[in-house]
Amino acid sequence: MSKKGVLAIILLGALSFSEVFAQEIVAGQIEKPLTTTLGDPQHGRKIVLSRQTGLCILCHSGPFPEERFQGNLAPDLAVSVASLTAPQLRARIVNASYFNQNTIMPSYYRADHLNRVASKFVGQTILSAQEIEDVVAFLLSLQNTNQQTVTTSKQKQ
Ligand code: HEC
């Protein structure tokens, strides 16, 4: 089996699943939030750092001084988010394979097209709709930090 296949199976085994609601990507974006409750950036940060739910830093690095081991298989999260809007970030986390068919990044809110899913997980997603919104809110907060840093360094000059 390919390395990617093994990784996918490890991820599917490690991640917890919840019920799916269909979401459509239009022009690389999911315009509307998946829930009516605003995303909670603090909770989003916990998901991104969690070794059980998000697993993001298995592949990504980011501004997380408390985490000694961060991934180097994917762009730094603080850098990747700089030019992406909320609808673009949402779409990438919901379905990374829409943007790159061969990506190793899991599609966190997509229940179709998954192979080798144990029957109890069929029709379920890795993160819940609210968790997706929390992660998007957290990533957007990194963007604000970036902008503040840029502004501050500009002011210093
Ligand atoms: C198994 C590895 C892996 C995991 C886990 C993973 N990613 Fe990714 N991610 C990637 C790779 C690789 C890319 C680069 C684009 C591609 O190949 O699809 C990427 C791209 C992205 C992008 C777009 C970056 C850009 O510049 O366009 C965002 C945003 C992102 N990931 C966020 C996340 C978040 C949030 C999580 C956790 C909920 C996560 N990723 C989990 C591997 C991963």
Image: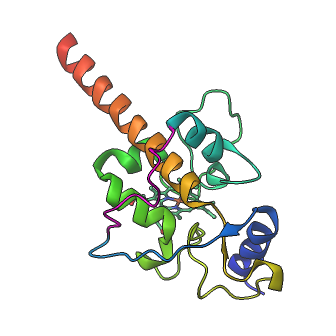
On-image quarter of the N terminus: bottom right
The residues colored magenta run 29-40
Main SS category, magenta section? loop
Nearer to the camera, 98 or 3: 98
Please tell me which residue is depicted at 71% across the width and 41% down the height of the picture: 69
Nearer to the camera, 149 or 143: 143
Tell me the quarter of the picture where residue 6 sits: bottom right
On-image quarter of the C terminus: top left
User: Measured along the vertical axis of the image, is residue 76 above or below residue 116?
Assistant: above
Please tell me which residue is depicted at 72% across the width and 81% down the height of the picture: 5
User: Measured along the vertical axis of the image, is residue 110 above or below residue 1?
Assistant: above
Q: Is residue 8 left or right of residue 82?
A: right
Tell me the quarter of the picture where residue 28 sits: bottom left
User: Measured along the vertical axis of the image, is residue 150 above or below residue 97?
Assistant: above
Please tell me which residue is depicted at 60% across the width and 69% down the height of the picture: 106
Q: Position of residue 150 (x, y in %)?
A: 26, 27
Q: Position of residue 132 (x, y in %)?
A: 53, 56
Please tell me which residue is depicted at 60% across the width and 73% down the height of the picture: 20
Nearer to the camera, 97 or 24: 24
